[in-house]
Image (cartoon, grey):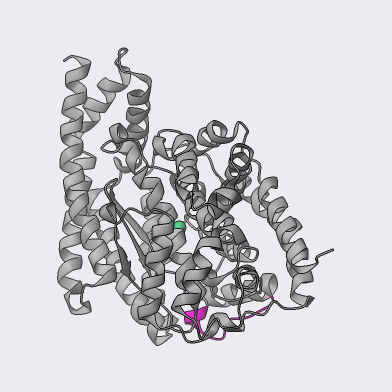
Amino acid sequence: METAELWKKYQEKMFVISSYDLVISTTYFDADTIAPIKGADYRNDRLAYLYGEVFSLQTDPELLELLEKLNSAEDLDDEKKRIVKWHLEDFNKMRYIPKELYVEYSQVQLEANDVWKKAKSENNYKLFEPYLFRLIELTKKTLEYRQTDLKGYNILLDDYEPGMNIEKYDRFFGLIKERLIPLIRRISKAEKIDTAFVYDYYPVEQQRKFMKEILDYMHYDFDAGVLAETEHPFSNAISKYDSRITTHYYENNLMSSVFSVVHEAGHATYNNQVRDDLAETFVFSNMSSGMHESQSRLMENYLARTSAFWDNLFPKVKELFPEQLKDVDQKKFVRAANASECSLIRTDADELTYPLHILIRYEIEKGIFDGSIDLNSLENIWNEKYEEYLGIRPSCSSEGILQDVHWAGGMFGYFPTYALGSGYAAQFMHAMRKDLDVDQLMRDNKFTVIKDWLREHIHQYGGLYLPEEQIRIATGEEFNPEYYVDYLTEKYTSLYFPE
Ligand code: ZN
């Protein structure tokens, strides 16, 4: 068969897989936004079945044959070669896992997700604990079937961030510990920034209007996305042309929805800006977690927490909440958006203390998979680590070990990419600021120019390149976490200890 014909056949198979994916991800989005809880069992049983069907398609020997033929075809262009290479690697991750185990795992994930919601709202870790144990056990079992040179937790780390491993993460978090913990200690003794107005009463209806203003300012494409409401904000790339975001409104916290919306819009922008001819290929959705997170953090922290970002939006927020913000000017607003204080909830953490929340989860996961942690004392270990690194201790499970959904989804190895993404973003920003006057562009209401830079240097490729390659393409350098700790050190030193 000619190469062009092989490629066509391969695309046909991808079309079938993506049809199932469309149904699964739409249902998943639905389940986490508007679907009623009583329909959960019915929904989950069918979803687990669909996961099984997709598993069969993804591990179909005919697909493997096509991929192998394409992989050895000499006349395939370079980009297609890469697409095939990444797909083959992905195929090899799945191919030795028994389908029954995969379906069982999916089923437990779905149940665990529902039980976690209940356990969190009832503040009852014991309810969730057996599901967590089961997921850990099944994850370990799945790892036994993987044929790779990597071992244990390193397999999981590499799945979410190709090229990363314990050794590299230890170095990354080591730098964070060494450079940021002393600064955080100093700030905790410094004069506090006044944030009281943030926790005033902000009616949800008005917040909804404000989110629309923010997303319009960022040129979020409402014809290719939607903003919905959920318990735990997330984004969902159904396709390039349907990249959805969610938020959670708290009546007594204005900043929470603001920054979660900007964050998720950062993810959606990445998906929306993948090149058209790559949008229906394997690399549309195989960006690494760290790369994806770098794009959401870049918008959330490196852009939306600057004063320039608010030049156009501050008058609007004042207009929507005249009473609440009557004594607040833009300077005070932006200072409050950057205030740093050790807190218990990761998703509400400020930019500076955030990586410590990730460090805690990373150390716990490492201990789970190397067997150095007794699973029965997980909650206690969690609390101890918060005390050690952040100087505060959760008083209940819902603000401690139950706060995040990730483990309920079996996503072990994922958390570290959150901190890594912030690290990547610092380096991307450094490169972008060499090319553009970013602050002036935001003041001039030209957010699209910033998005164009991101498209040209990063987004257009989707997951065509490995993170390390993508960083080199966009910045001309290897990944260097010093940019991240330098940025945080400079920013927070001048915020809390102005000369
Ligand atoms: Zn994110």
In the rendered image, residue 135, in percent from the top left (x then y), is placed at: 37, 64
The residue located at (15%, 33%) in the rendering is: 12
- Left or right for 113, reference 22: right
Residue 217 position (above or below residue 350)? above
Magenta region: 391-399
Which secondary structure type mostly characterizes the magenta part of the structure? loop
Given residues 137 and 426, the one toward you in this image is 426
Quadrant of ligand 1: it is bottom left
Q: Quadrant of the C terminus?
A: bottom right
Q: Is residue 463 visible?
A: no
Given residues 486 and 68, the one toward you in this image is 486
The residue at the far right in this view is: 499
Tell me where residue 61 sits by quadrant: top left
Tell me where residue 186 sits by quadrant: bottom right
Q: Is residue 227 visible?
A: yes
In the rendered image, residue 361, in percent from the top left (x then y), is placed at: 55, 64
Residue 277 position (above or below residue 250)? above
In the rendered image, residue 405, in percent from the top left (x then y), is placed at: 41, 68
The residue located at (40%, 68%) in the rendering is: 211
